[in-house]
């Protein structure tokens, strides 16, 4: 069988970019069981309630839902178990110092395969207030309207 190359996205947490201000991102490997990997290869996972926690010099991913593998037997995994993340010591220490500041948390942004290995993109984030969320939405809407106006002008110039 040929080796996988490139990046294959499994799940993405789109709401996280709306609810949090992303300060820094990291790529971490995941320690998974066989049935978890098979379930991920079917493209099934949810990052909606997920968060990361640092405990005793190790990084753990909580509440990420990887459903049980349908052809699995008694060896099947628990869908919402905590999973160990593989990060460099310096990255863990940086995250420890940053999360001790008020309002900072670690959230998963994306779950994907990179060259055949399961990876998770985590972010050091700060929660947004309601008015910040409205401001972000307004900026996005303004950007979309300006892009439409520019493309309309270009179409008019060509035609």
Image (tube, rainbow, N blue to C red):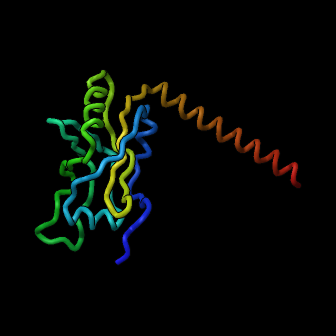
Tag count: 0
Q: Name the spot of residue 149 as percent of width and height, x first.
A: 76, 42
Q: Name the spot of residue 76 as percent of width and height, x first.
A: 16, 65
Q: Name the spot of residue 96 as percent of width and height, x first.
A: 25, 30
For residue 25, above or below residue 4: above
Q: Taking 19 as reference, is 93 left or right?
A: left
Q: Name the spot of residue 24 as percent of width and height, x first.
A: 40, 35
* Furthest-top residue in this view: 102
Q: Quadrant of residue 39?
A: bottom left
Q: Taking 143 as reference, is 78 left or right?
A: left
| Quadrant of the rendering where the N terminus is positioned | bottom left
Residue drawn 76% across the image and 47% down it: 151
For residue 57, above or below residue 5: above
| Quadrant of the rendering where the C terminus is positioned | bottom right
Residue drawn 24% across the image and 47% down it: 85
- Front in this rendered view, residue 112 or 19: 112
* Furthest-left residue in this view: 74
Q: Taking 103 as reference, is 8 left or right?
A: right
Residue drawn 31% across the image and 57% down it: 118
For residue 89, above or below residue 45: above
Q: Quadrant of residue 142?
A: top right
Residue drawn 70% across the image and 42% down it: 147
- Front in this rendered view, residue 41 or 131: 41
């Amino acid at each position: 069988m040929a080796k996988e190359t490139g990046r294959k996205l499994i799940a993405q947490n789109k709401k996280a970019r709306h609810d949090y201000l992303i300060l820094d991102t990291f790529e971490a490997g995941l320690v998974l069981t066989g049935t978890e990997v098979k379930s991920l290869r079917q493209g099934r996972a949810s990052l909606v309630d997920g968060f990361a926690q640092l405990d005793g010099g190790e990084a753990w991913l909580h509440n990420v839902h990887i459903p049980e593998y349908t052809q699995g037997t008694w060896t099947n995994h628990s869908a919402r178990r905590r999973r160990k993340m593989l990060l460099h010591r310096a990255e863990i220490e940086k995250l420890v110092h940053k999360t001790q500041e008020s309002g900072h948390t670690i959230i998963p942004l994306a779950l994907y395969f990179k060259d055949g290995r399961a990876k998770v993109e985590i972010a050091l984030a700060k929660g947004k207030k309601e008015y910040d969320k409205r401001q972000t939405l307004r900026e996005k809407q303004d950007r979309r309207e300006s892009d439409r106006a520019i493309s309309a002008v270009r179409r008019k110039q060509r035609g």
